C-alpha cells in the first residue's frame, strides 16, 4: 500500500498594511503646514520602505498637531510593519476618535486584529467599515477576503479578491490569494491562472512560485513544478513551506532521498510545520526506516491532530512493524476525520482480513469500493475475504472485476485460480495459474497452486515439475509440498 505524497495546500497570508490617504492642507496655518510637511516626508519614506524614519516624521507631525488623525493612522500602520501590532491598534483607535470617517484607520486596525487574534470577525467588521467609507478600497476587500478564508469562507475569499482585482487589476496579492482559495476547492486550473498573473505582476513573488509549483504538481507536471519551487527558494531561501512543497514533488518523482532532505530543511526553518514532519515520515517509510517514520508521523499528529493522512500513513508504518491493533486505530481515526477516505477503509479491511476477521473486512472493503469503485486492489482484497468464508462464486466475481480494472494483475489471476480449483473447475484454475506465472514467473505460490491443480487432473509429471519449481523459488514451501511431491513420484 504505497502512499503518494499529497501536495500541501498553499498558505494564505495577509497583505502588508497599506498607506492612508493624505489629508487636505489647512491653508494659512503655519503650524498645520509644518505638520503636513512632516507627514508628507513620512509618506515619502514609506515609499522607500524606511519605516523607522517615517515613524520619526509622523511623531513630529503629531507634536505639531496632536489632532492629526491621518498621522496617527499612518504611524500605526508602520508600527504594524515593524511588528508592533498592539501599537497599530492603539494608533488606529486614536485616529478613529479624531476622525470616525478615516477608512485607512479601520483598515489598519483590521489587519492588526487579524494578525493578533488569528483572523477574527472583529477584523472583518473593521474591513466592512473601511469599505463602507471607501467603496473603492481594493486592499480592504483583499484583506477582508483573506480573513474570511481563514475562517473557512472560501467563497467569500474568492468574491472579495475578485472585487479587489476589479478595483485594482495590478494587485498581485489578490490574484495570489484567489489562487489559494481556488486550489483549496480543487479548481487547480483556475489557481494556476491566478498564480501566473501574480507572477506576471511581481516576478519576484516567491510564495506565488511555490504555490504555482505545488499546483503544477497536482496537475501532473512535476518537472515544471520543480522549476517553480527551485525559483521560489532562489528568491527566498527561508520559506519552510517551499521546501515542503518541493519535497512533495520529489517524493512523487520517486526521489525519496531528495524529498527527505527538503523536509529536513523545512523542519530546520520551522520546527512546528506539521506537514514537513508528515512528508518526511512518508519518505522515511518508503526508504525502509519504519520506526523513524512512525516517530515523524507522531510529531505531525502532535502539531496537527486533524492531519488525516498522518494517521493513515502512521497506520501503514505500524502495520509494517506488526502493530496491527494500533494500525487499525489509526485508520479508524483517519476515517473519523474524513469519512470518505477510501484508502483508510481499504487498509483497515486488509488488516482485518489478515487477522481472519473476514466479515468486518468485507464491510470495510465494500465501503472502500463504494467510495472509489476503480481500485482493483479493493476488489481483490474483498475476494480473498469472501473466499475464506467459502463464498467462492462472489469471490470470483470480485477477481473478475479486479482483472477488468487491471488486466496484468497477477495476484488476482492466482486467487481466482484458487477459487476455481476449490469449485472443481481445474482447467479454468490451471488457465488462471498459467496467466499468473506469465505475468510474474518468480511467484512460487502460483507454481505450487498449478501443480496441485494438475495433480487433480492426473497430470502427475506436470504436477511434479511445478511443485519442484515452487520449492526452488521458495524453500519455505517444502514442508507443505514435499509429502505430496514424494507421493507423486512414488505413483510415477
Image: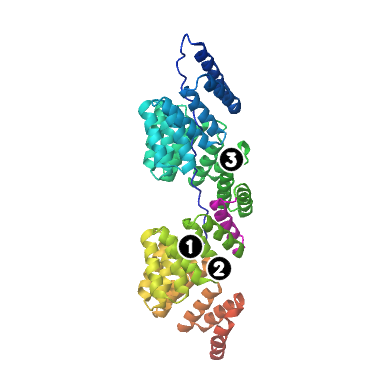
Q: Could you say where residue 470 lies in the image, as x and y percent from the top left? A: 57, 77
Q: Residues within 10 Å of mark 2 (few under 14, many from 20)?
A: some
Dividing the picture into quadrants, the one containing residue 277 is bottom right
Q: Is residue 401 left or right of residue 312?
A: left
The dot on residue 320 is 2
Q: Main secondary structure of the magenta part?
A: helix
Circles 1 and 3, Cβ within 8 Å, touching? The answer is no
Dividing the picture into quadrants, the one containing residue 358 is bottom left
Per the rendered image, the range of residues in magenta is 271-290
Give the residue furthest to the bottom: 490
Q: Secondary structure at mark 2?
A: helix
Residue highlighted by disc 1: 408
The dot on residue 227 is 3
Q: Is residue 135 visible?
A: no
Q: Could you say where residue 446 lies in the image, as x and y percent from the top left? A: 52, 74
Q: Is residue 465 visible?
A: yes
Q: Is residue 129 magenta?
A: no
The earlier-in-sequence mark between 3 and 2 is 3
Labels 1, 3: front one: 3
**CA separation in Å, label 2 and label 1:** 26 Å
Q: Residues within 10 Å of mark 3 (few under 14, many from 20)?
A: some
Give the residue furthest to the top: 28
Dividing the picture into quadrants, the one containing residue 406 is bottom left
Amino acid at each position: 500500500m504505497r502512499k503518494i505524497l499529497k501536495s500541501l495546500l498553499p498558505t494564505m497570508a495577509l497583505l502588508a498594511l497599506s498607506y492612508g490617504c493624505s489629508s487636505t492642507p489647512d491653508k494659512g496655518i503655519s503650524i498645520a503646514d509644518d505638520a503636513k510637511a512632516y507627514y508628507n516626508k513620512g509618506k515619502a519614506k514609506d515609499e522607500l520602505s524606511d519605516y523607522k524614519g517615517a515613524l520619526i516624521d509622523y511623531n513630529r507631525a503629531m507634536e505639531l498637531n496632536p489632532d492629526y488623525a491621518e498621522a496617527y493612522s499612518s504611524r500605526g500602520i508602520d508600527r504594524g510593519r515593524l511588528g508592533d501590532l498592539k501599537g497599530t491598534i492603539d494608533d488606529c483607535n486614536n485616529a478613529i476618535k479624531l476622525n470616525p470617517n478615516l477608512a485607512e484607520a479601520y483598515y489598519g486596525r483590521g489587519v492588526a486584529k487579524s494578525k493578533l487574534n488569528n483572523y477574527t470577525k472583529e477584523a472583518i467588521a473593521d474591513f466592512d467599515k473601511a469599505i463602507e467609507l471607501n467603496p473603492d478600497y481594493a486592499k480592504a476587500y483583499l484583506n477582508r477576503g483573506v480573513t474570511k478564508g481563514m475562517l473557512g469562507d472560501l467563497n467569500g475569499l474568492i468574491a472579495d479578491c475578485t472585487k479587489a482585482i476589479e478595483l485594482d487589476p495590478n494587485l498581485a496579492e489578490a490574484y495570489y490569494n484567489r489562487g489559494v482559495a481556488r486550489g483549496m476547492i480543487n479548481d487547480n486550473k483556475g489557481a494556476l491562472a491566478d498564480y501566473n498573473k501574480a507572477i506576471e505582476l511581481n516576478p519576484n513573488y516567491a510564495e506565488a512560485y511555490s504555490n504555482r509549483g505545488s499546483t503544477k504538481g497536482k496537475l501532473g507536471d512535476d518537472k515544471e513544478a520543480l522549476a517553480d519551487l527551485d525559483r521560489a527558494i532562489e528568491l527566498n531561501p527561508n520559506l519552510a513551506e517551499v521546501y515542503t512543497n518541493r519535497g512533495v514533488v520529489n517524493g512523487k518523482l520517486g526521489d525519496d532521498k531528495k524529498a527527505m532532505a527538503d523536509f529536513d530543511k523545512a523542519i530546520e526553518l520551522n520546527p512546528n510545520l506539521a506537514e514537513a514532519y508528515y512528508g518526511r515520515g512518508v519518505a522515511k517509510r518508503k526508504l525502509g526506516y519504519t520506526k523513524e517514520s512512525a516517530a515523524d508521523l507522531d510529531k505531525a499528529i502532535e502539531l496537527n491532530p486533524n492531519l488525516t493522512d498522518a494517521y493513515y500513513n502512521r497506520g501503514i508504518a505500524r502495520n509494517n512493524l506488526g502493530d496491527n491493533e494500533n494500525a487499525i486505530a489509526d485508520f479508524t481515526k483517519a476515517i473519523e476525520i474524513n469519512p470518505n477516505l477510501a484508502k483508510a477503509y481499504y487498509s483497515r479491511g486488509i488488516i482485518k482480513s489478515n487477522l481472519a476477521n473476514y466479515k468486518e473486512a468485507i464491510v470495510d472493503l465494500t465501503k472502500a469500493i463504494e467510495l472509489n469503485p476503480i481500485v482493483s486492489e479493493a476488489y481483490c482484497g474483498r475476494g480473498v475475504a469472501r473466499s475464506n468464508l467459502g463464498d467462492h462464486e462472489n469471490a470470483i466475481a470480485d477477481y473478475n472485476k479486479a482483472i477488468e480494472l487491471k488486466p496484468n494483475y497477477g495476484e488476482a489471476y492466482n486467487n481466482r485460480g484458487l477459487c476455481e480449483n476449490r469449485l472443481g473447475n481445474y482447467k479454468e484454475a490451471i488457465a488462471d495459474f498459467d496467466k499468473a506465472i506469465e505475468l510474474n514467473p518468480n511467484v512460487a505460490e502460483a507454481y505450487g497452486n498449478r501443480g496441485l491443480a494438475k495433480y487433480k487432473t492426473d497430470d502427475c509429471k506436470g504436477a511434479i515439475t511445478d511443485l519442484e519449481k515452487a520449492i526452488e523459488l521458495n524453500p519455505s514451501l517444502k514442508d507443505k509440498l514435499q509429502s505430496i511431491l514424494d507421493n507423486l513420484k512414488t505413483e510415477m
